Image (cartoon, grey):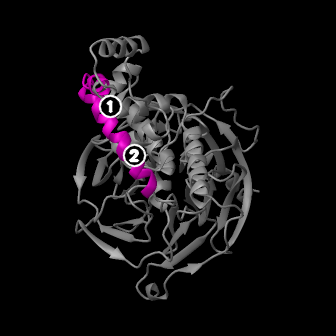
Amino acid sequence: MVQLFDMVTQSDRNNNRLAELTDREREIVAKVATGATNQQIAVDLDISINTVKAHLRNIYAKLGVESRTEATLCAIQYGLVQLEEAPPEERAESSTAAAEQGKAPETVLAEWIRPLSWGQMAILALSLLAILVVALWPEHKTVIADAPTRLVDTPVDLQSEVQPSSSSRWQSLAQMPVPTSRFASVAVDGRILVIGGAERDGITSRVMAYDPVNDRWDYRASKPSPTANIGAAVINGRVFVPGGLLADGTLAATVEVYDPATDTWHTGPPMPQPLCAYALTTYGESLYVLGGWDGHRYLDTVYRLDTHKNTWNQEPPLESPRGFATAAVVKDRLYIVGGYDGTQDLALVQSRALSSNESAEGWITHTPMAARRAGHGMAVSQNTLYVVGGGWESSFVYNERYDVANDAWSTFESPLIGEWRNLGLAVAEARGGAFVFALGGWNGRHLGIVEGYQIFFPIYLSTIEKGR
């Protein structure tokens, strides 16, 4: 009875895993099982090779595997791939001919198997091996199996385009030239840069620049390597972009540095280890990289790059691992907000002092956000943190802002109702005052929206008051 129960349970798991695959993913995993390369699959299905790679990452995550071989075993196990047999009429003819020649049945079987191609024999061998794999297949995976589903997105079939809400404080502006999510965004020299990220055709190295005063876009020199799940920060007029998820599914440790004055890129000192989905901020001439995903797990590490000495140092770690968090420095304190710990999204807000006379106090916990958020955007202005979007576990109809001085959160309206994550957020001057700009992101598809939330009005309002 126990063995029967185990078999039923395994069958249920197989069915559940199979049901998670889309038709296109089933088509791709079936081709993988035949030994087709990514290039061959791309040609056969008339899609880009980056799209094939993105589908494979989703397939691996859904099946709980980590290689093409394991995916092939699952394809056989779940019935997505079957051994090719000779047509019934050919088998009947072979049996009749053998009987007329007085051959034994086992001889007939041997002659029928012999014509199998090398590919068919390989699948036959894998199918036999699959029996052993099923018996030894682990019941549970660690956070490793869950992580790829957070690193890539699969578009869903939406019936209508995303419609911004009718909020009075948000203004719809010129859309991004290419809808993008999981990019790095930063305000520098009066422009907001959108660097790399994920587009419809895969991970990109594209760099787009938004002019908030004239509400228009142009292009800048492409980033040397296409990466996603990245951040960017400005030190001494240069834009630093560490690590990221590469198009082949591996992680980068490189630090690429953009000079807006010359529209050129160069390479900085590599990170101590490959990372993506980290939180990023600056303090003086130092760049801080907090947490993130290292290809196996979410981390609690804090690395600091001294851009003057071009050296990396390891700082006191976070109190717990997390990825897809945001970070900022306010009044000599390093804040980290929200994130995902491998199990759930977080509302956690913590900080530690960066000044030498207080740095020994360690991390302290502040009033949490009203909602758990990860993959959100965050920008800081006048000692206030603005948090927009985020979350895999639920959709939000409001955003939040944090008054650092009073350790208090309040809500403000959202320009987009529903799922919205992996967007960019930046504060910049535009006509009419200072705005928080929310750009792109994910809402069942890659978004190209640009929404501006006015936080300060022109200074002449106070001048009128003084003249009375």
Dot 2 falls on a residue whose secondary structure is: helix
Closest to the observer, 159 or 18: 18
Separation (CA) of disc 1 from disc 2: 23 Å
- Kindly identify which residue carries mark 1: 38
Which residue was labeled with disc 2? Answer: 130
**Does the magenta segment cover residue 333?**
no
Q: Position of residue 395 (x, y in %)?
A: 69, 49
Q: Quadrant of the C terminus?
A: bottom right
Residue drawn at x 39%, y 52% as measured from the top left: 132
Q: State the extent of the magenta-drawn residues as a range.
A: 108-136
Q: Residue type at mark 1?
A: Asn
Residue drawn at (74%, 58%), measured in percent from left and top?
411
Do labels 1 and 2 touch, CB within 8 Å?
no
Q: Secondary structure at mark 1?
A: helix
Tell which of 84 and 44 is nearer to you: 84
Disc 2 marks which amino acid?
Answer: Ala
Residue plotted at (61% across, 69% down): 348
Residue 461 appears in view? yes
Q: Is 155 on the left-hand or right-hand side of 52?
A: right
Instruction: Report whether 305 appears left or right of 52.
Output: left
Q: Is residue 383 left or right of residue 418?
A: left
